[in-house]
Image (cartoon, helix red, strand yellow):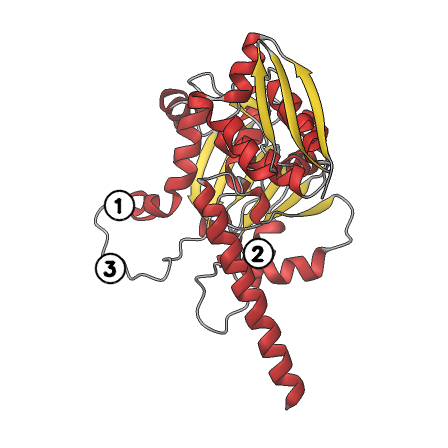
Amino acid sequence: MKKENEKRLMLTAPELQRVFGGGDNHIRRIEKELHVEIIDRDGELKILGTGSAPARAADLILSLARDHGEDPDEQRVNYGIDLARSGESAEAMETVDADVICHTVNGKPVRPKTLGQKAYVDAIRKHLIVFGIGPAGTGKTYLAMAMAITAFLHNEVSRIILTRPAIEAGEKLGFLPGDLQSKVDPYLRPLYDALYQIMGAENYLKNSERGLIEVAPLAYMRGRTLDNAYIILDEAQNTTPEQMKMFLTRVGFGSKVVITGDATQKDLMPGAKSGLDVARAVLKGIDDIAFCELTGRDVVRHPLVQKIVRAYEDYESKHRGDRSREKRKH
């Protein structure tokens, strides 16, 4: 029978509020997932459990208790539990929680929320071209947008250019009425959403009318040289190798480029090569180009989305293994 261990912590009232969460949901989840019992006696927490569980829970609680401008949400608690279960120190999250890129128009801080996202943001700061590759919900585009808007507002670049290939996601949308901009806007909606949330619709429209912020399909990039600009190519898995080469050779002096994509969600014609896959093979090892691989652990949407992503990763990994074994048999 394992010996029961104990850890004690003294917390202030605001710290307790952050740690316990609404309806004590956070603390109850920590108890359940880390297999500990937590008793509160006037600000002193007594954490009981076997092995290293109390120490891991105490580490996580101290991390959640610190004030970083907003109370921990469900995603932050779940990620902290995930780190604790894998034996990683919750202190590693200190630099993540403290890294505020900017604020939305509503005053909410925009920051990386996982270690993978922090590495991605740091890579954007250090390199001229960064590829952010990972599943939906890992914040690839949103964080890139936050970095671009911050650089623009600080006069580090003179304009922002946002682009993505206009490919239908497995659906035939048919005839779309209106001018060319009306036809391509549905494909670019996720970029507009991030712009409005971080910059505000009025500020975006003002800068857009002055030509300082451009949201356009990838085809518009051909024949241009883009100097002193922050350029984001979204949904890069849907580019052809020729389009990717065209885009990368548009980069001019004083520019910063972030390319995002999910290699598992291609909408290209069957058998067509993805420009993202080819770029990853061709450009690795070149100075000032970084590749950041985000995973299911970096998903920051509803916890169910994280489970869905992981289930698909496991399924696809198993089937790749099955296909590899079949090839060896033949």
Q: Which residue ends up furthest to the front in the rendered image? A: 1
Please name which of the two marks, 1 or 3, marks the residue nearer to the observer: 3
Relative to 312, does residue 254 appear above or below in the rendering? above
Relative to 266, does residue 287 appear above or below in the rendering? above
Looking at the rendered structure, the secondary structure element under dot 1 is: loop
307 or 288, which lies in front?
307
Upstream in sequence: badge 2 or badge 3: 3
The residue where tag 1 is placed is 179
Q: Quadrant of the N terminus?
A: top right
Kind of residue sitting beneath label 1: Asp
The residue where tag 3 is placed is 174
Kind of residue sitting beneath label 3: Gly
Query: Which residue is found at the position 58% from the left and 78% from the top?
Result: 323
Query: Which residue is found at the position 37% from the left and 25% from the top?
Result: 205
Relative to 195, does residue 215 appear above or below in the rendering? below
101 or 254, which lies in front?
101
Q: CA distance from mark 1 to mark 3?
A: 15 Å
The residue where tag 2 is placed is 244
Kind of residue sitting beneath label 2: Met
Pointer 3: residues within 10 angstroms few (<14), some, or many (20+)? few
